[in-house]
């Protein structure tokens, strides 16, 4: 019974906002280690809510260019941040101190 009510509530919630089609949270978890030069490219849609978690072997700052997000990361304490992808384009994310490219975020209109 409770499940039905929750489902009904979710349905009402979804119906309320017909323009928010891309409102599913896009979650990315990244493990950065000093040895590799590889990095992922994440492709999302404009308006997507995004959550990024970066586990780093070294103490540094994670910098998402374009969105100008800076977050500390150290071993055992990942950088975690959330934002809405309200700018389109191709954005680099790096470890600021090490100047190491760790991911590319592509936001499509
Ligand atoms: Cu930077």
Image (cartoon, helix red, strand yellow):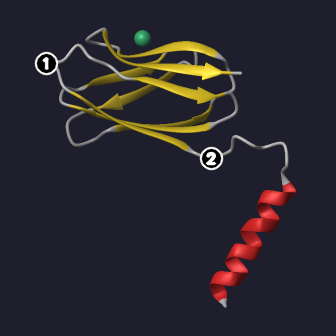
Helix, strand or loop for disc 2: loop
Residue at the image point whose x is 37% and y is 23% from the top: 40
Q: Quadrant of residue 104?
A: top left
41 left or right of 97 in image: right
Q: Is mark 2 within 8 Å of ligand 1?
A: no
Label 2 crowding class (10 Å Cα cut-off): few <14, some 14-19, many 20+? few
Task: Give the vertical position of 67 relative to 76 (above or below).
Answer: above
Label 1 crowding class (10 Å Cα cut-off): few <14, some 14-19, many 20+? few
7 left or right of 91 in image: right
Query: Residue lying farthest left?
Result: 35
Residue at the image point whose x is 50% and y is 21% from the top: 105
Query: Label 2 vs label 1: CA separation?
Result: 33 Å
94 left or right of 75 in image: right
Helix, strand or loop for disc 1: loop
The residue identified by callout 2 is 24
Where's residue 1, x and y in %?
Answer: 67, 91
Q: Is mark 1 within 8 Å of ligand 1?
A: no
Where's residue 107, x and y in %?
Answer: 61, 22
Where's residue 59, x and y in %?
Answer: 22, 26
Please give the label number shown on residue 35.
1
Viewer-side label of 2, 1: 2
* Sequence order check, earlier mark of 2 and 1: 2
Residue at the image point whose x is 69% and y is 74% from the top: 7
42 left or right of 100 in image: right
Judged from the image, the quadrant occupied by ligand 1 is top left
- Residue nearest the viewer, comparing 66 with 48: 48
């Amino acid at each position: 019974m409770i499940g039905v009510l929750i489902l009904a509530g979710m349905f009402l919630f979804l119906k309320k906002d017909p323009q928010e089609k891309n409102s599913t949270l896009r979650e990315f978890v990244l493990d950065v280690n000093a040895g590799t030069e590889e990095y992922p490219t994440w492709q999302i849609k404009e308006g997507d809510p995004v959550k990024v978690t970066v586990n780093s072997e070294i103490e540094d700052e994670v910098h998402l260019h374009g969105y100008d997000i800076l977050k500390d990361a150290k071993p055992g304490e990942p950088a975690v941040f959330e934002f809405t992808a309200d700018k389109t384009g191709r954005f680099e994310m790096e470890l600021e101190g090490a100047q190491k490219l760790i991911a590319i975020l592509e936001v499509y209109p």
